[in-house]
Amino acid sequence: MERPAAPSLPDAVRGHWADRLAPARLRPYLRLARIERPIGWWLLLLPCWWSAALAALAAGRPWADPFHCILFLIGAVAMRGAGCTYNDIVDRDLDTKVERTRGRPLPSGQVSLKGAVAFLILQCLVGLAVLLQFNGFAIATGFASLGIVALYPFMKRFFWMPQIVLGLAFAWGALMGWATAFGSLSAPAVALYLGSIAWVVGYDTIYALQDIEDDEVVGIKSSARFFGEKVRLGVAACYALTVIFMVVAFILADAGPIAFAGLAAFALHLGWQVVRIDRSDGAGALRLFRSNRDAGLILFAAMTLESALRAL
């Protein structure tokens, strides 16, 4: 029997509609999909939008395809939720041993394993419906990511840098936007993908600082533990690679000065995060992690403005 819904988890957005307005029976499932933590789907969505905007720059279009961008939004919410549900199914025993995660719906008993599996299938069907709206090459590209997604939850058990595998999955949208626009992949999209991977590793290392003590006790591996006292240097290296690969992507796509100005602002934001890292401040780490949404939107807005002004 499923138990009554529990209060929101420590890293959830306070007063989110999912905790205030959704029917009580649905709230545990919404928490399972991390709906009350929208930063996750934002971070999955942004590489999709970057890629679509980069494709528009390369093709000389005034903006990224709005229909594709809406589909990416729906797909990001659905597949982020599916990924979190799958991750919680795999990690349900580990989650009981970590302070921040033991209140999640599965380890706390708010949702049964059977209910979680059914919910996972439902979210995957929504993601599939979105994917089938694209061209054949993009559909195949989307399916190619599933193996990486399936592998990720197991990596923290034996690989010191599971964030790399997370990056391979979460940055996949950097390929999808280009694939939906052109029906193929080329060097600018690959460079953007590599930069996005480094970005994911950097910001998720910051996120992992919240759990570093529990992870050490339980034996969960993470880049935050791997970098140790040099975590600021490790994140700085990841973010430096992010900017380098994105500069390459912009050059290959023939981006202009406004896009590069946006990239400079994005780089400054990443630098600000590095300066603010404090291994002992879990709440501060969460704020820095969440700030990557704003950094990503700055970059997307600059590319979009560049395309629009070129079309005038």
Image (cartoon, rainbow, N blue to C red):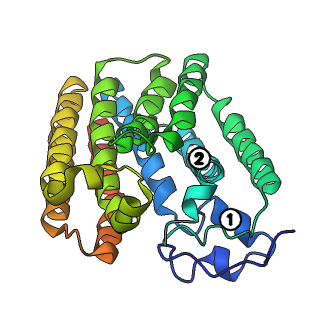
- Residue at 33% x, 71% y is 287
Determine which quarter of the picture holds residue 243.
Answer: top left
Across and down, in percent, residue 153 comes to 52, 44
Q: Which residue is mark 1?
A: 30
Instruction: Evaluate whether residue 62 shows in this view.
Output: no
Disc nearer the start of the sequence (1/2): 1
Query: Quarter holding the C terminus?
Result: top left
Q: Which residue is mark 2?
A: 83
Question: Within 10 Å of the Cα at label 1, are there few (<14), some (14-19), or many (20+) other Cα atoms?
Answer: some
Across and down, in percent, residue 74 comes to 61, 48
Q: Is residue 22 above or below residue 295?
A: below
Q: Secondary structure at mark 2?
A: helix
Which residue is more in the foreground, 82 or 43? 82
- What whole-number distance in Å separates the C-alpha atoms at marks 1 and 2? 13 Å
- Residue at 48% x, 30% y is 176
Which residue is more in the foreground, 71 or 231? 231
Q: Is residue 305 above or below residue 175?
A: below
- The amino acid sitting under disc 2 is Gly
Question: Within 10 Å of the Cα at label 2, are there few (<14), some (14-19), or many (20+) other Cα atoms?
Answer: many
Which residue is more in the foreground, 165 or 157? 157
Across and down, in percent, residue 53 comes to 37, 38
